[in-house]
Image (spheres, helix red, strand yellow):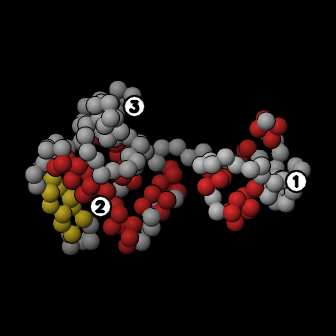
């Protein structure tokens, strides 16, 4: 069914959404959002907009292009978020029983230094990326030791992190 949509462009007004099953993404939207989302198609338009205009960002490019998406703001609140990302990693290390001291210092130049007495980030070669684990977690989004907690494969049983972008965003 969706293959018939390839190469077509849509403009608001003529197509109405069919009733949605409970808990589907469209069904969870408010009625106002549903109507603006679902009242969509007309025939193909010649706008010069096609698959070639879709940008795929890789590596840390999404962070560089839209940092606010990852830290909430590029102002003081975003700076605080960055500091908390690093502090959270220290807290995770302490909760895992590998650190007993965390110090956070605001330096005279306005930078922030966060130090713990934990294990640090591993520096051995990462089997998937072929570079050190340190370089991997600092340069690859969604890379970290906190994902396989349920299977025992991760480095942490408890973690404050949500999505593995923290330290690479910092």
Is residue 133 among what the camera can see? no
Q: Quadrant of the C terminus?
A: bottom left
In the image, farthest residue toward the front: 22
Is residue 106 among what the camera can see? yes
Query: Along the horizontal axis of the image, is 10 left or right of 143?
Result: right
Q: Do labels 2 and 1 touch, CB within 8 Å?
A: no
Residue shown at the point (69%, 63%) measured from the top left:
31
Q: Disc number at residue 129?
A: 3
Query: Along the horizontal axis of the image, is 169 left or right of 85?
Result: right
- Say how many tags the image has: 3
14 relative to 80, above or below: above
Find residue 33 and report its horizontal and vertical position in percent: 68, 63
Find residue 111 and report its horizontal and vertical position in percent: 26, 67
| Residue tagged 1 | 42
| Residue tagged 2 | 84
Mark 2: secondary structure: helix
2 or 1: tag closer to the N-terminus: 1
38 relative to 158, above or below: below
Mark 3: secondary structure: loop
Q: CA distance from mark 2 to mark 3?
A: 27 Å
The residue lying toward the viewer, choosing from 48 and 39, is: 39
Residue shown at the point (84%, 53%) measured from the top left:
15
Find residue 39 and report its horizontal and vertical position in percent: 79, 58
The residue lying toward the viewer, choosing from 133 and 14, is: 14
Query: Along the horizontal axis of the image, is 64 left or right of 14?
Result: left
The residue lying toward the viewer, choosing from 27 and 154, is: 27
1 or 3: tag closer to the N-terminus: 1
Quadrant of residue 2 within the rendered picture = top right
Q: CA distance from mark 2 to mark 1?
A: 48 Å
**Mark 2 or mark 1: which is in front?**
1
**Mark 1 or mark 3: which is in front?**
1
Find residue 142 and report its horizontal and vertical position in percent: 41, 43
């Amino acid at each position: 069914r969706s293959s018939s949509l390839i190469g077509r462009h849509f403009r608001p007004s003529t197509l109405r959404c069919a009733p949605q099953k409970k808990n589907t993404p469209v069904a969870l939207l408010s009625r106002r959002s549903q109507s603006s989302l679902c009242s969509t198609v007309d025939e193909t338009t010649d706008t010069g907009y096609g698959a070639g205009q879709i940008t795929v960002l890789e590596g840390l490019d999404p962070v560089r292009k839209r940092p606010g998406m990852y830290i909430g703001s590029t102002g003081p609140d975003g700076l605080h978020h960055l500091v908390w990302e690093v502090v959270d990693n220290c807290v995770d290390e302490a909760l895992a029983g590998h650190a007993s001291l965390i110090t956070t210092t605001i330096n005279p130049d306005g930078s922030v230094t966060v130090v713990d007495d934990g294990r640090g980030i591993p520096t051995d070669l990462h089997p998937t990326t072929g570079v050190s684990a340190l370089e991997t977690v600092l340069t690859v989004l969604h890379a970290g030791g906190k994902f396989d907690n349920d299977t025992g494969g991760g480095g942490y049983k408890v973690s404050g992190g949500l999505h593995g972008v923290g330290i690479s965003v910092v």
